[in-house]
Amino acid sequence: MGIDDLRQRIFRKNADFRKRYQEPTLSKHPRDVATSWSEKTEAPQTPDKAPPPELSEEDIMARKIIKWGVGGGLLFIAASLGIFLFFFSGWSGFGVGRDTVDKIQLTISGGEEVFAGKQVTWRVMYKNDNTIPLEDAVLTFEFPPGSQPIVGEFSKNGIHRERRNLKTIAAGAGGEEVFSGIVFGPERSDIKGNATLEYRPEGTSAHFSRVEEYRSFVTGTLLGLRLEIPEGLKAGQEAEVKVRIVSSAQSLFRNLGVSMEYPEAFEYVSASPAPSIDKNIWLIGDLPAGGEYTASIRGRIKKAETDQTFHARVGIYDRQDASWAIFNNAVQTFSVASSLLTVSLETEQGEVSPGVTVAGNRLQFAVKWKNNLPVAVENAMIEVGFLGSAFDLKTLRSDYGEYDDAGQKMRFVPGRIPELSLIEPGAEGEFSFQIILVKDIPQKNVNDKNFSVKLQAKIGTSEIPQGFEGVDLTGEAEEELKLASRASFSQEGYYRDSRVQNTGPVPPRVGEETTYLVVWSIVNSLNDLGNVRVRATLPSYIKWKNIILPPDEKISYKPSTGEIIWTPETIGAGTGYSRPVREVAFQIGLKPSLPQVTSAPQLISAAALEARDLFTGTIFNQRDDQLTTNLRNDPEASQGGGVVK
């Protein structure tokens, strides 16, 4: 029977298929079932199975079509899997693929020990031990970090690589490639790179690679770095530290920079040449072959109980991420020698935190001295100088000192302090004095900030003991206090205000909305404030009107809690003095209810200011009172104008 005949029989017009349907029937059990456990039953007899019904030609053809479809689908899946494995899994080429990697030799020689700044040569040798050629072969050489593949060109732009096209490497063939560059890195450091051979086995479409790593040890450098620090440094004296860079390379060093890390006992004063960035980074630029560079840094030595360390480095500085490609380091340690005559200053009263005070405070200082010589010292004298415009010298009080107005110094002499007439070996003593800081420090412009006061003490004698002729016996000390900024915050409310048109009755009435303007203001004196944040909360019956002035201020309202947060972030020094007061205003609405009659409902909770003094690190926490409808700064809403009717 053909397909056309089958189609005509299947789709015959007015065909009746009811004859093909047979009503299903249940067969009767051939044996009776016992009605109780005591009755004996016989094993049931299985009836003979009925012969399977004959299949029509249409059913036979349908089953064949299903078998052909399933078989064809399985064949298609198998063919697709074979194609995938052939082209993408390296099974093409009769098993050639990943196994080829193990039959490739890749070795790197040279550059085991290098000098920073000197040209280095690496030899990369390769050989194909496979029985088939390697096509599209490319050799990539990765230089150590900070190194340069071309002599004289220096930059800090990631890791440098050099690619060479080897084309086809025949079976059993090999070759050698030479790579040259200049290595940089700290002396006695271990640096590394690698070489990668990429290829495609003949007759395949898959690519593979063989990687070999190499290491180089930096035994020395052609870019010398040296620190020169004077010996016998004593607290209070000014010293000059030099950093020297010398190139012994035969090529140019480009884009060089040098940085210094100062110890705690060294207070930077000046430098020649002046630093390019902050007080410790010099951007040298190009240094020619055999060239030199010197930076001289002056600073004041402070008292220190432990050894102090200078740390210098030279290399290429990246301004974008403030990182270094270091070519050389230098470290030198020194100790602060004890003076033969020592003097010290200590703040006894007036600090708000260690090393921090505020304008207007009364300060009390202690001056202590000691003779460290093995012999007595006669007629010693102590001077204390006052540096900074914040001292109110008219308030200086001391029972022992004599003030020199011309030099702004107070002198303590043997005539006022008998103990200074003769100081025995190991003897020590102390005295104190008081002074008040001015309350208002003038700020001429917005750059006048970060104020401090400093005292310098010095002890010495004009009568040098026998055996110490030519020896400097003087001792010096210094005490510095930073002045914390004074910040004030206020929360005010207004009904009548030129910035916004408020509406509603005053006094407020039940069922009618009256709007008010809340104004937050910050005044700040001496230093910049950071991390500034103001918080307050609206009662549930107060409506946030979403009117903010100025509109670009960062202020947010959270309806679920009623919390308002203002984050101006930074308040500059002199705000409210040499620059305008920092303010933000927002509108709120009140619709009183019956229980609020004859009362002055709260409009907003007390507001809290949080901020950090960026110069002293002092943390500010200040609050201003809640606002009610009795607005203290608005005559129309005060004196009974805030009582709900």
Image: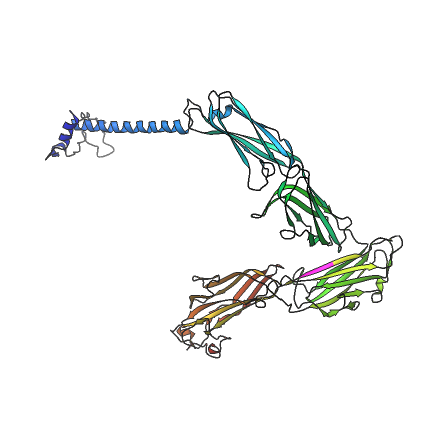
Note whether 514 is above or below 22 in the view shown: below
599 displayed left or right of 342: left
In the rendered image of this protein, does residue 289 appear above or below residue 66? below
Q: How many marks?
A: 0
Residue at (39%, 26%) from the top-left corner? 86
What is the residue that sits farthest to the bottom in this orientation? 639
Question: What residue is shown at x 63% (from left), y 31% (from top)?
Answer: 112
Q: In the image, residue 633 lies at what x, y percent? A: 51, 75
Residue 247, position as x, y percentages in the image:
68, 40
Quadrant for the N terminus, please. top left
Give the main secondary structure of the magenta stretch: strand
Using the rendered image of the protein, determine whether residue 54 is visible from the camera's viewpoint. no
4 is within the stretch colored magenta: no
Q: Residue at x 85, y 66 (%)?
A: 415
- Position of residue 53 relative to residue 151, above or below, is above
Depicted 337 relative to depicted 254: above or below: below
Q: Looking at the picture, how far across and down is residue 422, in whole percent?
A: 86, 61
In this view, the residue in front, 361 or 292, is 292
Would residue 579 appear left or right of 78 to someone viewing this image? right
Q: Farthest residue toward the left?
A: 14
Q: What is the basis of the colouring in this image? A: rainbow
Name, please, the residue furthest toward the right: 466
In what quadrant of the picture does the C terminus appear? bottom left
Is 480 in the magenta?
A: yes
Q: Residue 520 placed where, x, y %?
A: 51, 67
What range of the chain is rendered magenta?
478-482
Q: Nearer the viewer, residue 498 or 427?
A: 498
Q: Quadrant of residue 346?
A: bottom right
Residue 10 visible in the current orientation: yes
